[in-house]
Image (cartoon, rainbow, N blue to C red):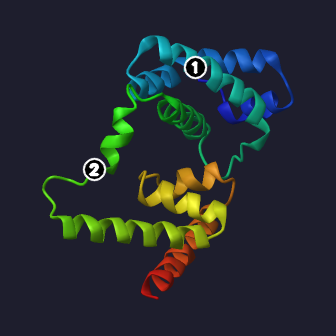
Amino acid sequence: MPDLEYLLSRIALRDRDCFRELYRFTSAKLFGVSLRILGNKSEAEDALQDIYIKVWQRAGSFQSGMSQPMTWLITIARNHCIDMIRARKPLTDDLDQAETLPDKDKTPEEAAINSSEGARISHCLDQLEQDRARAVRLAYVDGENYKDLAQRFAVPLNTMRTWLRRSLLQLRECLGQ
């Protein structure tokens, strides 16, 4: 296997031969990641093209000390596929209405309390800086790990940990009021 860090550094300089070589050695893995997330071969093939466009455009942002090249590539693929899933249009508008109905297992009082708590949490998240609030949602709602978040926001891993810790402290303070 070729040195992927070297290939990415050459791709950052717009070396098409290195890009072809990177594609040849990594496309099967990234296709597998895409297929596993999307569950559809045709969508995974389309996603793979978009993923390599992003790799071409972002190769200069790869930092060799921050992560392994394959991890960086897989993160781009994973995030792109998740974005594709989020962009899918719901099958019917009835789903939007169903989200506003209370759970049958909950009493009206419990539903009201949950709704009120959700509104308080949303209000407190709105008090955070936009990127911090997004990082909190991605970490604690979507389950992204700190390393992936650090890459997504292009900050060092310890900075991401600090963002999340301070944001949680601010949320705790806001919710305590």
C-alpha span from label 2 to label 1: 38 Å
Q: Which mark is residue 48?
A: 1
Q: How many marks?
A: 2
Instruction: Classify 82 as above or below 14.
Output: below
Residue appearing at x 49%, y 23% in the figure: 29
- Quick one: 101 or 27, which is closer to the camera? 101
Circle 2: residue type? Leu
Instruction: Classify 28 as above or below 106.
Output: above
Mark 2 — residue? 101
Q: Where does the image place residue 150, in percent across and percent down from the top left?
A: 61, 56
**Quick check: marks 2 and 1 in contact, CB under 8 Å?**
no
Q: Where does the image place residue 92, in percent across and percent down from the top left?
A: 38, 27
Residue appearing at x 68%, y 59% in the figure: 155
* Badge 1 density bin: few <14, some 14–19, many ≥20, Cα 10 Å: many
Quadrant of the rendered structure where residue 159 is? Answer: bottom right
Residue appearing at x 37%, y 21% in the figure: 39
Circle 1: residue type? Leu
Helix, strand or loop at mark 1: helix
Instruction: Classify 87 as above or below 49.
Output: below
Residue appearing at x 79%, y 39% in the figure: 60
Q: Earlier in the sequence, mark 2 or mark 1?
A: 1
* Badge 2 density bin: few <14, some 14–19, many ≥20, Cα 10 Å: few
Q: Where does the image place residue 173, in percent across and percent down from the top left?
A: 49, 85
Q: Which mark is residue 75?
A: none
Report the side of 166 relative to 6 (left or right). Answer: left
Quadrant of the rendered structure where residue 111 is? Answer: bottom left
- Quick one: 9 or 47, which is closer to the camera? 47
Q: Indicate the quadrant containing the N terminus: top left, top right, bottom left or bottom right.
A: top right
Residue found farthest to the top: 42
Instruction: Classify 64 as above or below 4.
Output: below
